Image (cartoon, rainbow, N blue to C red):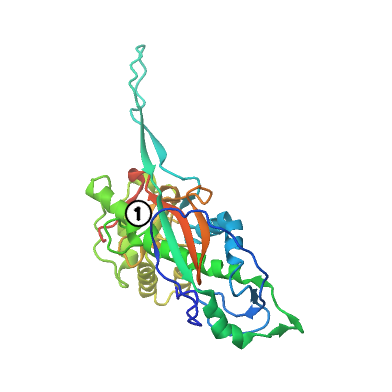
């Protein structure tokens, strides 16, 4: 995402998400609002086109301190909601380590006799979700707002009146949370690696690192498919499906792939059925299935997989992202420091694959 104020070059936004601790309480200060900035475009960045209708007040940001303190938990809740996790499970009740138990039942039915010969066939095991604390810090110099575009748009009105529909502090935090969510999606959920030189990725291990650990521990054995390309991706997906246990083929599962790999699958469909309009339409539907799964395995592209060549089959309940926006350690703080405002966001994030017997993958990393 472009920097929050890249379109005017007027705010100092320094640093990225990294590991750290929560912020101390800050004094609050509230002053009158200064009116009306108008922009169009609420994408990943705002591109400077000025129109009446979307306005912002308080450009000197003196209300930012009070507003963020009041809405701190709401903002963190929005952060988790913005994650691209519709096809996995979000646990927002994981403030610290949380156990996910598993019950395995062994043994079986035998022919009747008059002798009771049962053994202990119940085995409990568990995996632990361990969210890590992360932070995002920004430095904003309010005076630079006034010395640049604020003077240019001073006096803009809407229907003859000052337009102050959307508080500027809310606009700022919306853009900050969007950028943070994008970083969590693209760098932490899937690609997180505590051994990474990238400070954001190093916060905690993501799903791909966790899966690699299960493979190393021989808890998961990859299905040999070889490389996936635009010419063979459908065939490779079918090879992966054939390699999972039959007991899982009657359960609704998801094939998770990167967006690049998903594109290969679509191109492969087109190559397999060049004159079949129905098949090509199916290949471009939102819910695309592995053909030989009989509709039991949906193919879903995932931003969190980056450019990985890994293909994963499992159920949404077996990929968990955990954190807690209500935690005492999480929050949004603003501190005034002479000429600047220091804004900090602390939140927790962690990933878990609770059942290694319910996840399957190809042999491409």
- The image position of residue 224, as x and y in percent, is 24, 57
Task: Examine the rendering and report whether any part of residue 301 can be seen.
Answer: no
Q: Which residue is mark 1?
A: 204
Task: Examine the rendering and report whether any part of residue 4 can be seen.
Answer: yes
Residue 279 vs 92, above or below: the answer is below
Q: Is residue 361 left or right of residue 322?
A: left
- The image position of residue 92, as x and y in percent, is 50, 49
From the viewer's side, name the closer residue of 68 and 245.
68
Q: How many marks?
A: 1
Q: Secondary structure at mark 1?
A: loop
Q: Residue at x 40, y 42 (%)?
A: 97
Q: Residue at x 29, y 67 (%)?
A: 228
From the viewer's side, name the closer residue of 342 and 190.
342
- The image position of residue 106, as x and y in percent, is 34, 30
From the viewer's side, name the closer residue of 351 and 202.
202
Residue 265 vs 359, above or below: the answer is below
């Amino acid at each position: 995402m472009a920097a929050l104020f890249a379109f005017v070059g007027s705010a100092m936004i320094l640093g990225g998400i990294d590991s750290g601790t929560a912020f101390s309480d800050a004094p609050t200060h509230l002053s009158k609002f200064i009116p009306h900035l108008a922009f169009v475009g609420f994408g990943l960045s705002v591109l400077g086109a000025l129109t009446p209708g979307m306005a912002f007040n308080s450009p000197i940001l003196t209300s930012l301190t009070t507003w963020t303190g009041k809405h701190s938990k709401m903002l963190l809740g929005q952060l988790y909601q913005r994650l691209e996790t519709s096809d996995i499970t979000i646990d927002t009740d994981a403030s610290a380590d949380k156990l996910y138990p598993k019950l395995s039942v062994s043994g079986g039915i035998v022919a009747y006799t008059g002798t009771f010969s049962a053994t202990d066939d119940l085995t409990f095991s568990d995996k632990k979700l361990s969210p890590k604390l992360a932070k995002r810090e920004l430095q904003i110099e309010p005076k630079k707002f006034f010395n640049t575009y604020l003077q240019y748009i001073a006096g803009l009105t809407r229907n003859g009146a000052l337009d102050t529909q959307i508080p500027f502090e809310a606009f700022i935090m919306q853009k900050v949370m969007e950028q943070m969510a994008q970083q969590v999606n693209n760098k932490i959920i899937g690609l997180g690696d505590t051994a990474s030189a990238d400070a954001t990725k190093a916060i905690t291990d993501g799903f791909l690192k966790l899966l690699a650990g299960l493979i190393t521990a021989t808890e998961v054995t990859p299905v040999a498919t070889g490389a996936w390309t635009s010419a063979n991706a459908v065939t490779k997906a079918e090879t992966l499906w054939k390699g999972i246990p039959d007991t899982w083929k009657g359960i609704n599962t998801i094939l998770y792939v990167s967006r690049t790999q998903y594109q290969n699958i679509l191109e492969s469909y087109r190559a397999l059925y060049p004159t079949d309009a129905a098949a090509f339409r199916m290949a471009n539907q939102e819910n695309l299935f592995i053909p030989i799964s009989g509709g039991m395995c949906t193919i879903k592209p995932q931003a969190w997989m980056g450019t990985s060549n890994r293909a994963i089959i499992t159920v949404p309940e077996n990929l968990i992202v955990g954190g807690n926006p209500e935690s005492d350690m999480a929050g949004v703080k603003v501190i005034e420091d002479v000429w600047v405002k220091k804004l900090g966001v602390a939140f927790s994030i962690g990933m878990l694959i609770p059942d290694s017997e319910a996840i399957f993958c190809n042999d491409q990393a």
